Image (cartoon, grey):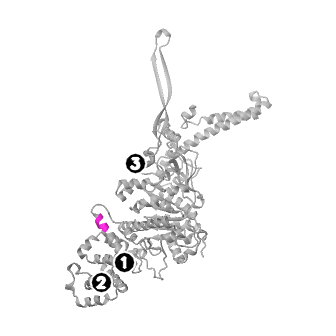
């Protein structure tokens, strides 16, 4: 191995430029004045060509040194509008970057030597400009504006406000586009990054491509970020898919679409699982959670049997007054299966009084009516009637009211969160209200029509309600994934193919949305076409939500692609660095010494100076490197553990985007104008939906 590959001398003066200048001057002299160097004109042109080639080669080598040093302090501006984002049907664009190898670890270590500090820090002219800018902040403001002017003509313009250690990306001047094969997305992607370091910008980049690719795109945004909502709106309309867009936003209920989280199910028991799954199952709470599941399941089965679609309002109503549901269901079953028992119930109701009712049932609404039905069902004639739903309701109404209130104490607060104020109108829609123009959607409809859904939960205003609604929608989506896995999305429709439809889920702050059902979704959801891209700040957020370190590791282990922006937690950074190998880097040691010699030899002493090159093993990347990433930059483990260093394009120019509304009010007005019924959506072909055409 040659010395050039052992030690790269990139942080040094660009001495090649001296040779380039001298060679260039020599070439000029050989052409213009060959007599000055005693050359024959026939020979001088060949000499000039040789000197010219040498000047170009050495000039190029010197320029590489200057460019490398410049990149360590200031990267070239990387700006891309939404229209310029590249689109591929085979790959997902992530930004500019390079594959991180041993060479880059070596260069990064070289920047830590004290003798090269002058190449990494701003020069004295730059520091003087910043000092003048500060001093002229109140007067001579034109001077400060001139010093801040962002142009290549201004050599002292401020560095980009991205913070971090710029050398992490500057160690490789040769960048290229970084792509992730779409086949890898089914393995799911997790993105870590602390607040305000570029997670939302990266989300916009990925969501934009999914929308323009014509795939199902579902965005969960617990904060209800206005910029992200506007970006989804703009890209859906730019792609000609405005009619496929659905916006659900708790902060804007007057324009939000409506959604019933428990209205669609494969088995009626899913209703109870989605509601009770949000209750704590730790310790003593497990028994209350199981009772809540059973109680909600009884109510849901009765509602379905009565021909009513379950929703949160109905379930809350009958949790508070199970007697009403019991009377309704019992009278219907008796009327259908044993009409003769009706007369006995009427006679009992006329004879019995409040004191005849058992003490445990006293105080309940319509206690006499309930006891009349109970006596009739306990008679010889009534014993011939068996209905499992009715038996469940009978057991529920027999509970002492005080005892019953205690065991549903954990269930009622959850239901109150979901049925208070305008939230109830969104989560318990009235399907028969023709005066309400807001559409009602469900996941099956969205996936079949290859729709786009933005879910804003407005967690900053009410985090409790946002968490409850998000969990409900996510549980419903998990159920939908199970249905697709078993039957396919187009099951039951004639003339349809069962080709798998990619379903892209972008879950910002996904730890707020997840429960126990999230694990099977990322573990087995790939078979249903689910492709989860999850965004969170630290690994501790996941563990705090799940409350179990083993389950946290299980969740993280199911994400095959890892993108990590700047994080402030070493434990999170080690999720990336602990998966990387150690590499050997070269170190140079200066050794000098002297020794006395025998005076008879004519020498008083001898000395020696040596440069020794050795190797030392170091991690390919340290947690400190992840912690000091500039904004908008990330390390990524892609395609089976390949380490990439990427930076995302800045969104400059999007302010002039004609498709991007200036405010949410403009979106609200457009939605009011364009609301249309979802009836007949199944007549639309996927090709027509992608073109924005509708039959």
Which one is closest to the eye, mark 1 or mark 3?
1
Return the residue nearer the eye: 353 or 315: 353
Above/below status of 64 relative to 629? above
Magenta residues?
286-290
| Pointer 3 residue | 570
Q: Which of marks 1 and 2 is nearer the N terminus?
A: 1
Q: Does the magenta stretch include residue 296?
A: no
Instruction: Tell me where residue 27 sits by quadrant.
Output: top right
Location of residue 340 (image quadrant): bottom left
Q: Mark 1 points at which residue?
A: 302
* SS at badge 1: helix
Which of the pair 481/13 is nearer the observer? 481
Query: Mark 2 — residue?
Result: 382
Please tell me which residue lies in front, 478 or 231.
478
Mark 1 surroundings within 10 Å by alpha-carbon count, few (fewer than 14), some (14 through 19), many (20 or more): many
Q: Residues within 10 Å of mark 2 (few under 14, many from 20)?
A: some
Q: Can residue 225 be seen in this view?
A: no
Instruction: Identify whether 646 is placed above or below 609.
Output: below
Spatial separation of the CA atoms under disc 2 and disc 3: 68 Å
- Residue depicted at x 43% and y 68%: 476
Q: Does the magenta stretch include residue 288?
A: yes
Quadrant housing the C terminus:
bottom right
Residue 205 point in image, percent of width and height: 53, 59
Q: In this view, does 582 lie to the left or right of 214?
A: left
Task: Residue lying at the far top in this picture: please name it.
Answer: 600
Q: Main SS type for the magenta part? A: helix
């Amino acid at each position: 191995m040659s010395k050039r590959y052992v030690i790269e001398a990139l942080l040094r003066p660009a001495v090649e430029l001296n040779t380039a200048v001298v060679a260039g001057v020599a070439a000029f002299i050989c052409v213009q004045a060959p007599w000055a160097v005693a050359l024959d004109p026939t020979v001088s042109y060949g000499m000039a060509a040789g000197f010219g080639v040498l000047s170009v080669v050495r000039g190029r080598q010197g320029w590489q040194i200057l460019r490398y040093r410049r990149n360590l302090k200031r990267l070239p501006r990387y700006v891309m509008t939404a229209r310029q984002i590249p689109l591929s049907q085979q790959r997902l664009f992530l930004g500019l970057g390079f594959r991180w190898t041993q060479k880059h670890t070596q260069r990064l270590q070289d920047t830590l030597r004290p003798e090269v500090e002058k190449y990494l820090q701003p020069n004295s002219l730059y520091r003087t400009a910043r000092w003048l800018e500060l001093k002229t902040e109140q007067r001579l403001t034109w001077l400060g504006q001139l010093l801040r002017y962002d142009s290549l003509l201004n050599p002292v313009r401020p560095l980009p406000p991205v913070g971090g250690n710029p050398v992490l990306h500057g160690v490789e001047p040769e960048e290229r586009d970084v792509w992730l094969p779409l086949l890898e997305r089914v393995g799911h992607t997790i993105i870590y990054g602390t607040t305000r370091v570029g997670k939302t910008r990266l989300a916009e980049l990925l969501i934009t491509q999914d929308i323009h690719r014509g795939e199902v795109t579902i965005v969960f945004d617990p904060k209800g970020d206005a910029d992200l909502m506007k970006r989804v709106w703009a890209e859906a309309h730019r792609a000609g898919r405005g009619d496929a867009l659905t916006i659900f936003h708790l902060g804007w209920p007057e324009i939000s679409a409506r959604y019933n989280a428990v209205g669609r199910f494969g088995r009626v028991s899913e209703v109870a699982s989605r509601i009770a799954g949000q209750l704590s199952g730790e310790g003593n709470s497990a028994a209350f959670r199981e009772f809540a599941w059973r109680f909600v399941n009884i109510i849901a089965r009765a509602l379905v049997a009565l021909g009513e679609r379950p929703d949160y309002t109905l379930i809350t109503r009958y949790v508070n007054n199970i007697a009403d549901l019991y009377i309704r269901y019992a009278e219907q079953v008796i009327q259908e299966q044993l009409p003769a028992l009706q007369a006995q119930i009427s006679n009992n109701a006329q004879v019995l009084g409040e004191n005849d009712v058992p003490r445990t049932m006293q105080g309940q609404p319509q206690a006499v009516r309930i006891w009349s039905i109970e006596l009739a069902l306990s008679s010889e004639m009534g014993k011939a009637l068996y209905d499992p739903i009715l038996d469940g309701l009978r057991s529920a109404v027999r509970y002492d009211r005080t005892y019953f209130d205690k065991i549903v104490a954990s269930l009622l607060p959850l239901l109150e969160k979901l049925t208070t104020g305008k939230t109830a109108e969104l989560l318990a829609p009235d399907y028969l209200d023709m005066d309400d123009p807001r559409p009602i959607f469900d996941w099956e409809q969205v996936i079949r029509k290859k729709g786009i859904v933005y879910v804003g939960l407005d967690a900053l205003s009410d985090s409790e309600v946002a968490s409850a609604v998000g969990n409900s929608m996510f549980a419903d989506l998990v159920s939908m994934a199970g249905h697709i896995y078993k039957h396919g999305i187009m099951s039951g429709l004639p003339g349809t193919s069962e080709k798998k439809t990619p379903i892209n889920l972008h879950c910002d702050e996904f730890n707020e949305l997840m429960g126990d059902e999230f694990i099977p979704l990322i573990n087995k959801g790939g078979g249903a076409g689910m492709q989860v891209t999850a965004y969170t700040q630290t690994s501790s957020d996941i563990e705090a939500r799940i409350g179990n370190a083993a389950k946290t590791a299980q969740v993280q282990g199911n994400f095959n692609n890892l993108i990590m922006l700047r994080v402030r937690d070493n434990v999170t950074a080690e999720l990336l660095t602990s998966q990387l190998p150690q590499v050997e880097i070269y170190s140079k040691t200066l050794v000098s010494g002297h020794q006395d010699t025998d005076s008879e030899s004519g020498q008083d002493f001898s000395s020696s100076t040596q440069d020794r090159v050795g190797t030392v093993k170091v991690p390919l990347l340290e947690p400190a490197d992840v912690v000091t990433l500039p904004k908008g930059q990330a390390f990524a483990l892609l395609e089976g553990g390949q380490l990439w260093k990427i930076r995302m394009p800045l969104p400059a120019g999007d302010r002039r985007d004609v498709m991007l509304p200036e405010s949410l009010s403009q979106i609200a007005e457009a939605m009011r104008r364009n609301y249309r019924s979802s009836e007949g959506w199944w007549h639309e072909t996927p090709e027509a939906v992608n073109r924005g055409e509708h039959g």
